[in-house]
Image (cartoon, grey):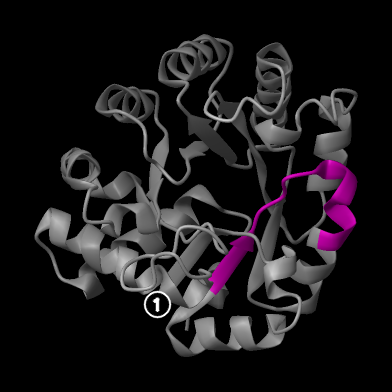
Amino acid sequence: MLVDSHCHLDFPDFDEERDEIVARADDAGVKIMVTISTRIRQFDRIRAIAERYDNVYCSVGTHPHNAGEEPDIDVEEIIRLAAHPKVVAIGEAGLDYFYDKSPRDLQAAGFRRHIAAARETGLPLVIHSRDADADMAAILEDEMGKGAFPAILHCFSSGRDLALKGIELGLHVSFSGILTFKKSTELREIASELPRDRLLVETDAPYLAPQPWRGKRNEPAYVAHTNQVLADCHGVSAEEMASRTTANFFRLFPKVPLQEVE
């Protein structure tokens, strides 16, 4: 089986055929999906989707793009919402200096609140980092010094130094369809260096469809193609990598019941 550890099933791209999207994922062997929150003020919509499908779970958090919209959300509110049985992660939160849609100080402050919530709940923090490697590494090192917390660098497309710093600090690293792009040679080299017990796969659907669907709408069923390329990076079979990334997922996301594996 495979797990899509990061998708956005609440996005309007899926409104017309969400049932079919979930069914196609299941048919492709993707037995679990985590639909990721980007705005806590819209959490009810995310939660409703997770409640509707047995094999869909969710997170709660504010994307760095939206940090400026939700500066008033405190750690206690995140923790309260995370108590729902279908909430299995905190985030996504982090730093995005590519688009800079929110002031950087608000991104950092929001990120640290999400870290505190992950530390308190024990749920993994889903980290978004783009063009912010140095500041991301500095915040992670500082916060780990205050107390460990589980986390994953999602949709990894940053530099080698951040990947290795993440591994050093105990984080996991997740790869998306970007890994399959022809020009992603350096990213594949980074992926090949990372320990297999820290790797996950995702789609980030509806974005970043892997080859051969690049440029089209992504969906969870396509995570198999990223898994195949990650397997190639490590010189193992797709089946072995699927087994490894799925085991890693359950270890990092302990709130997801193991009995879901069939």
Q: Residue furthest left?
A: 235
Q: Which residue is mark 1?
A: 1
Q: Is residue 257 visible?
A: no
> Taking 212 as reference, is 107 left or right?
right
As drawn, 11 above or below 121:
below
Let me know if residue 39 is in the magenta part: yes
Answer with left or right where residue 39 lies relative to residue 166: right
Local SS, label 1? loop
Q: Picture coordinates of residue 171 (x, y %)?
A: 42, 34
- Which stretch appears magenta? 32-45
Dot 1 amino acid type:
Met
User: Whole-percent x and y of residue 62?
Assistant: 74, 37
* Front-lying residue, 92 or 119: 92
Relative to 193, is 131 on the left or the right? right
Relative to 139, does residue 27 appear above or below in the rendering? below
Percent of width and height locating residue 116:
70, 24
Residue 238: image location, x then y, percent:
22, 72
Q: Closest to the observer: 229 or 243?
A: 229
